[in-house]
Amino acid sequence: MTWEQTENYDVLVIGGGCAALSAAITAREKGARVLVLEVAPKCSRAGNSRHTRNMRLAHETTFPPYTGAYPEEEMWENYLKATGGVGDLDLARKVVSGSSTVLEWMMDHGVRFQPAIAGTLHLGRTNAWFLGGGKAMMNSLYRSAEDLGVDIRYEAEVVDLDIRERRFHQATVLQGGTERIGVAATAVIAAAGGFQSNLTWMKEVWGPPADNFLIRGAPHDTGTVLKILLDKGVEAVGDPTQAHMVPIDARSPKVDGGIVTRLDCVTLGIVVNKSGKRFYDEGEDFWPMRYAIWGRLVAQQDDQIAYAFIDSKTIDKFMPSVFPALSGQTIAEVAEQFNLPVDVVTATVDDYNTAVQPGEFDHTVLDGCKTKDLDPPKSHWAQRIDEPPFYGYPLRPGVTFTYFGVKVNQHAAVIMEGAEPATNIFAAGEIMSGNILPKGYIGGIGLVIGNVFGRTAGEQAAAYVKTIQQAA
Amino acid sequence: MDNKELIAQGQQMMRICNSCRYCEGLCAVWRSMEYRREFAEGDLNYLANLCHDCSECYFACQYAPPHEWEINPPLTFARFRTYSYEKYAWPKPIASAFRANGLVVSLVTALALIGVVFGIVQVRGQGVMWKAVEGGNFYEIVSHNALVALFGVVGVLSVAVLAVGVGRFIKDINEKLSELLSPATLKMTLKETLALEYLDGGGWGCSYPDEKSSPVRRWLHHFTFYGFLLCLAATTVGFIYDFVFGWQAPYEYLSLPVVLGTLGGIGLLVGPGGLLFFKYRRNREITDENHSGMDSSFLVLLLLASVSGLLLLLLRETSALGILFAIHLGLVMSLFLTAPYSKFVHGVYRFLAIAKYALERKRTQATGG
Ligand SMILES: Cc1cc2nc3c(=O)[nH]c(=O)nc-3n(C[C@H](O)[C@H](O)[C@H](O)COP(=O)(O)OP(=O)(O)OC[C@H]3O[C@@H](n4cnc5c(N)ncnc54)[C@H](O)[C@@H]3O)c2cc1C
């Protein structure tokens, strides 16, 4: 390994996702010389942000791409309901009210939008959808940053930060996996995501079950920077075992499977565990309200696995998923392919079928189809599973991101142990989302946290650079 | 890659794409995909021919290489197009011309050139090649009747072979010609085809020549297509002048056939020239080598036909008339001859694919789907 001459920038941005680019662009527009360090190679840049599809943004009027107004107060209510209001409400308010400025900012930086895509959980009113998805959105932000003169370096992993007396001095960067470079900067912005792809860390927190978790997002979000900051005296926020987790197809890749691995058929059938028994009310509420709960439920089952069963009535009633269902003319035939106890599964389905009450099935409302005298019950969309062929999907917990992070204030400055903010260290995005989401989630808010706090961090870092330059 | 593998790869890709749907706003392919849950071979051939090869989806794809799923729609669809062109072409032994298309088209062109020159020399003697003719009258080189006979025969043959292909394509994609060309559908299809509606990445142009979106490709295609159409119009007007009014070529510089032909020729300089120029600046990962040879040979042929035609017009009163005329004739002859076995066919299948997409939309509206 070689140690190259130290370089010098005004603002150093660590990470290459939505939060990082929002910060870098803003700092550059405020006149700072900015360097972005992204650990991934160019072709795999942009972390979890490249897997996204929309942003939840408050807006007062109906105009494209939205199908209706979504007032700030409604978004605030949604946020409170989803999280139980246990986050830092000042910071959360900043995100919710800042969300109304995000669309324009994104469009000014080349991001393109479209109406909600087919079959997507009725998000056309509340969420703005990217034309071509999150990677296209990130491509636009990268292009905009390049045009503005932001320097971007790929395969550049930050492996150490020199932080003394609440002040950042220099970062150690491993370039291309071999070469060590020191980069000094007047201010630093940490936007390097959560730690969900760090399987060792996940196992420390979760124990052996973590071995059976699948990681939906980018392999590069390993929490290196989060760990360094915590080691250097930055205060932590949130609980390391809190993560956004949804049930996904067990056959998915270990990491980076993204959006297509989700399975939206739980509410249409029943779900059994490894012993062939049901364990939770599949029809409790609409799927978008319940999928995060189901991720944790599956994580609590033996071997962190579960199996969804449906029949031919419902096989085409949900968004197609990436792997074909296993099918058979009887439930037993399907159960056998999963190596499940065939008799138990058959009995479970029989008991369920017997308990199903007559009703008018309607998947678009909380219908009256439910079970009677069944434990656990199925309270909506309960139809008999009796029309062959039968289908089954294996489910595992799929981790979207972790909530554990660094504590920040309104200015996106990280808080050091002892409650003092750092002088020149800022954080944005998933690395600090735990301030706002200690638990619970509403779809499309992750990017908003990244953009709102990224822009604040960029502004604050650039302003700090100015004060230093003026003093000199 | 053999056909089974290709089809399996296409099905795997569509399964992933249909679960994702992020590209829905980019073009017709992705919206049409959503009408399906399963993808038979005919569906894949249809979608591949609906694809305008703009590659916006590739650069937007979170599953593009190096992701382990290696999703690459422009490349996969290019392979399917080559595969389907061959599948629909008749007769079978010649259909394989699509596999090394660049070579085949070049060879046919060379043969056509030699044939035409040789034929003229045989009939009219060597001298005619380097002799200035009063007013640039090229019928002195090849008689009017010989020209009509030659292009009549080749034209009818080509159209017949293309018709076989159309029949096979329609069967493969499970449609009826009467429905595809019904007045309402035809109107919609013409509008979308002539405007190249699906070559604009959802409104911002396509990734061309690199990953940045731009309208350049659409413009170059317009130059090519409308240039071709103008040349066709020039020939048709000339034909009418001759047969209906008895006005014999060559015509004045400012006469209708010459103006149309000149404009068309310029279109065919700019369009194919530009497309060729950018072709080699395009991202390698999305290029199918096989398909690329087919593209290039077709573009080169159009370009050469245009250059030779314009030169002929400029130099028709000089002693270069004979040789230029022979060359132009040979090139145009090659275009006609290879039409059913060259990139030319994409226009026919693309048009029908767009018609099917129009039908599909009408059907889902009808069922409220
Ligand atoms: C499948 C999926 C779908 C999602 N859909 C949505 C959605 O539709 N809407 C929404 O709002 N949210 C969505 N989310 C959540 C969303 O992705 C995140 O909230 C958001 O992208 C976080 O942005 P970020 O910039 O903080 O982190 P990331 O985008 O993950 O960026 C972190 C960056 O840091 C880099 N990095 C990590 N370590 C280092 C290091 N040591 N040195 C240098 N660089 C480093 C990484 O390579 C990466 O570029 C989704 C997540 C997933 C997994």
Image (spheres, rainbow, N blue to C red):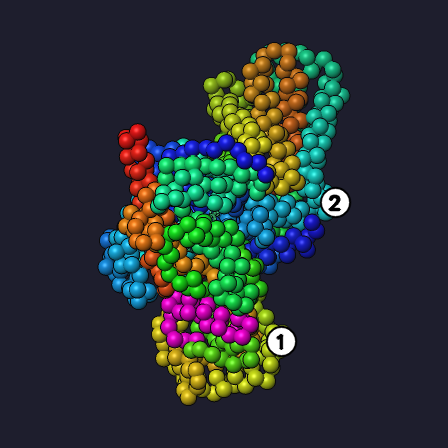
Residue A88 or residue B138, whichever sits in front? A88
Residue highlighted by disc 2: B93
Single out the mark in the foreground, 1 or 2.
Answer: 1
Q: Quadrant of residue A70?
A: bottom left
Residue B120 or residue A322, whichever sits in front? A322
The residue positioned 29% from the left and 56% from the top of the image is A92
User: Does residue A380 appear left or right of residue A397 in this picture?
Assistant: left
Q: Quadrant of the C terminus of chain A?
A: top left
Q: Quadrant of residue A208?
A: bottom right
Does dot 2 land on a helix, a strand or a loop?
helix
- Residue B294: x and y, percent? 64, 37
Residue B359 drawn above or below residue B256: below
- Residue B96: x and y, percent? 71, 44
Instruction: Tell me which amino acid carries mark 1.
Output: Asn
Which residues fall within the magenta stretch? Answer: A282-306
Q: CA distance from mark 1 to mark 2?
A: 51 Å
Residue highlighted by disc 1: A339
User: Does residue B331 appear left or right of residue A182 in this picture?
Assistant: right
The residue positioned 57% from the left and 84% from the top of the image is A344
Kindly tell me whether residue B252 is visible in this rendering: yes
